[in-house]
Amino acid sequence: MQYRKDRQGNDLSILGYGCMRLSKKGAGIDIDKAEQELLAAFRAGVNYFDTAYIYPGSEAALGEILERNHIRDKVNLATKLPQYLIGSRAALDRYFDEELARLRTDHVDYYLMHHLTDVAMWEKLKKVGILDWIGEKKRSGAIRFIGFSYHGNTDNFLRILDDYDWDFCQIQYNYLDEVSQAGRAGLQAAAAKGIPVVIMEPLRGGKLVNMLPEGARAAMAESGRAWSPAEWGLRWLYNQPEVTVVLSGMNSLEMVEANCRTASEAGANSLTPADFETLEKVKRAIREKERVGCTGCRYCMPCPKGVDIPGIFRCWNTMYTESKSAGRFQFAQTVGLTRQPAFASQCIRCGKCEQHCPQSIPIRDKLQEADRALRPLPYKLGISAVRAFMFRKGAEKR
Ligand code: SF4
Ligand code: SF4
């Protein structure tokens, strides 16, 4: 196992254990199988374990496994505040205390504001007193380090990053998402401030392994490298020294073994020009199915009406490169449920964006097409209902 430093100089294994998809038995977690897999990773040097309040059964299973193997104090435990459920200062304590009880511990090493998608969400937390609360928890030792996980656009990521003295952050990042969400720009901005970055969805939830088109697999096979699709994705991340930990949701011993081997071999700045050329071919093969040739360059932004142009195009493309449901889910996550609405329906057809697009995309027309695909009536109604619940005024939600 290789290690990179956090902000305080602690060693973090470059492979972290993502506990969202622990092994299952029926509808619940297969605690014995999950235990074997977690322990195999621990013995191979993994020392960062990531869970969240809303991952079903995950905190409780992780707490049980760490306690019965007497390894709680030998690992770094990361979990997350369900910030979208918080309506008052009292709720902060209630959720946090419940998490400690589930995890069978008296402190969390790395605590994240879960799933921020725009700066307004962070502002809402500040209004309920999160800053004082964090200060108290850090002083008492109940929280060692504070961070946030993020799914919105690059601009909002940079604003949140600059608004607080974070110990770390967590972003979705992989070779297909280089210019979406926080993206490479976000990663590098965090690293420039000395903020460690934990990577989630390094293989897009397994899509860069299980759903690769034939052309992508052929490019890998012809590369002369005996690397699996998963290894290509992980090595691309480890190649970047700005990346601190890469989370992988492992649910077999073979997966643990393969990922630990990659994490012991892959170095920063070790990919060759030929490797990058292979990955370009892989990306081209994946993108052949895309509906719009948006590169995510963001020259069209900001839109005066707040439309998230590249975000909408990315989700629309995902409907064709992965699946309709994947694109719509991504849309709900990154565009549909941000506090400031960013829908294509807000477009007033002023045309400013099209003057700046190097790809000459007829953005106004394509936005309407994308919106019809991403938000058919049932989805539109569903997103409106969830927004009404999440953003209802002054509600104490628990
Ligand atoms: S045409 Fe629409 S999307 Fe483009 S800048 Fe104007 S309002 Fe925004
Ligand atoms: S300028 Fe064009 S290519 Fe760039 S993000 Fe906007 S729509 Fe996409």
Image (cartoon, grey):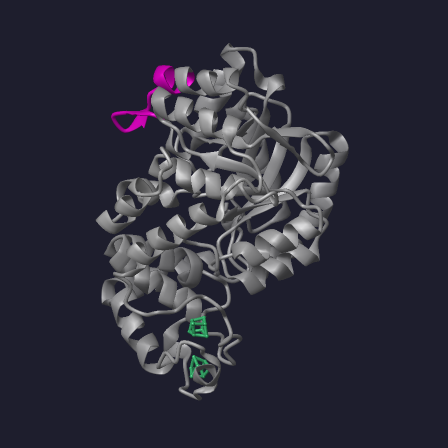
* Quadrant of the frame with the N terminus: top right
Q: Quadrant of ligand 2?
A: bottom left
Q: Does residue 367 appear left or right of residue 305 in this picture?
A: left
- Residue 24 colored magenta? yes
Up the image or down, 260 lies above or below 188; here it is above
Up the image or down, 288 lies above or below 347; here it is above
Residue 87 image offset from top left, x and y in percent: 56, 51
Which residue occupies the extreme right position in the image?
A: 139
Range of the magenta residues? 23-35
Residue at (41%, 33%) from the top-left corner?
249
Residue 74 image offset from top left, x and y in percent: 61, 18
Residue at (43%, 45%) from the top-left corner?
275
Residue 118 image offset from top left, x and y in percent: 54, 60
- Residue 275 seen anywhere in this rendered image of the structure: yes
Residue at (54%, 55%) from the top-left corner?
184
**In front of the other: 73 or 339:** 73
- Residue 31 colored magenta? yes
